[in-house]
Amino acid sequence: MESKWLHDFVALAEQGNFSKAADVRFVTQPAFSRRIRSLENWLGVPLVCRDRYPMALTEAGESFLEQARLLLSQIYGIRDQLRQSQHEHSSVNFVAQPSLAVTFFPGWIHSLRPQLGNSLIRLNTGHYHDAIEQFMSGSVDFLLCFSGDDTSPMLNRPEVERRVVGQDRLVLVSAVDDSGHPLHGLSADTPLPLLLYPPTSFLGALIQRKCLPALSEQPCVPVCENALGEGLKALVLQGDGASILPASLVREELEQGRLVELPLSAWVKLDIELCCRQPFRSEQVALCWQQIRQLAT
């Protein structure tokens, strides 16, 4: 069982409506409904009367509601005790999209180390929407993510502050043959095998919207989807197809000549944003954000 399921159930009981509860929990209604169903499956009993309007809890749901509140109180009480016990060793907690955790975060956090002193740096990873959920729930202090035209509305809330801390771009790449020519070049006569992020992911949706139309005269055939950029890069290096990836993820391979960039008529820039959410968990986190703002200006 996940603690977010308990939060969801309590929110549903308080709001009395799936749509309103989903808004309170910063998720879509279908995702919220799936999480309530997951809680019911884990408990083995229905908690909600779905055939009644307005919505009502079952007898088991009414009984479980107070237990859910008590469990959440105990969970966060234990968390606060543990945090207080480690107060002498301050920490700063980040969550980042997987490719940024590999390519951008190490060098960026190294440049900040003089300002952070002896703080313990913790980094979690999560795909775009999962990372935002960790951030909005207060599990981490900072969110490091790509931003674009369809940035999640959750990050446009008044308590969230955002700063651009870096930039990247999307590139179309292929492995090369022994002569250094692309194994999968652009040709109006030959379909280009593509290794893609899932269209439901942040980068996958961006590629579908901006990059694939730039290949309109090039016949393409998707051959694999993978949510991890490192996985797509490994497939490209094996010669399984071409892929559209963040340039930072393949910079070394391009410099070594193991990959070659293919031309795209649309150049897609990626801003890298750091987000924080007030109130800050500690003075150390507030100081860290102040220093990051100064460096980003």
Image (cartoon, grey):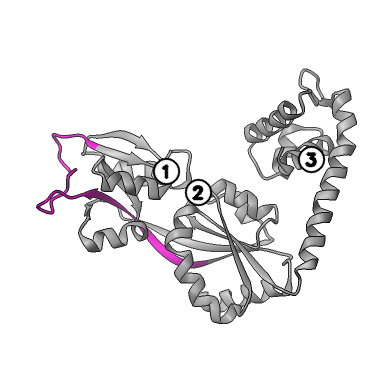
- The label shown at residue 204 is 1
Do residues under tags 2 and 3 come within 8 Å of each other at their CB atoms?
no
Residue 204 is drawn in which quadrant?
top left
- Judged left or right of residue 261, residue 29 is right
Element under label 3? helix
Q: Residue at x 82, y 46 (%)?
A: 72
- Give how far across and how far down residue 250 sits, in percent: 32, 57
Q: What is the three-letter code of the residue carrying label 1? A: Gly
- Give how far across and how far down residue 248 sits, in percent: 36, 61
Q: Is residue 123 above or below residue 199?
A: below
Q: Residue at x 45, y 70 (%)?
A: 107
Q: Residue at x 76, y 71 (%)?
A: 87
Whether residue 11 can be seen here = yes
- Tag 2: Cα neighbours inside 10 Å, few (<14), some, or many (≥20)? few
Element under label 1? helix
Q: Is residue 40 above or below residue 124?
A: above
- Give how far across and how far down residue 10 sits, in percent: 81, 39
- Tag 1: Cα neighbours inside 10 Å, few (<14), some, or many (≥20)? some
Element under label 2? loop
- The label shown at residue 6 is none
Residue closer to the observer: 217 or 134:
134
Residue closer to the observer: 79 or 9:
79
Residue at mark 3 to residue at mark 1: CA–CA distance: 31 Å
Q: Earlier in the sequence, mark 3 or mark 1?
A: 3
Q: Residue at x 75, y 68 (%)?
A: 86
What residue is disc 3 on? 11
- Give how far across and how far down residue 136 sits, in percent: 67, 53
What residue is disc 2 on? 150
Read off the magenta span: 164-192
Residue closer to the observer: 208 or 90:
90
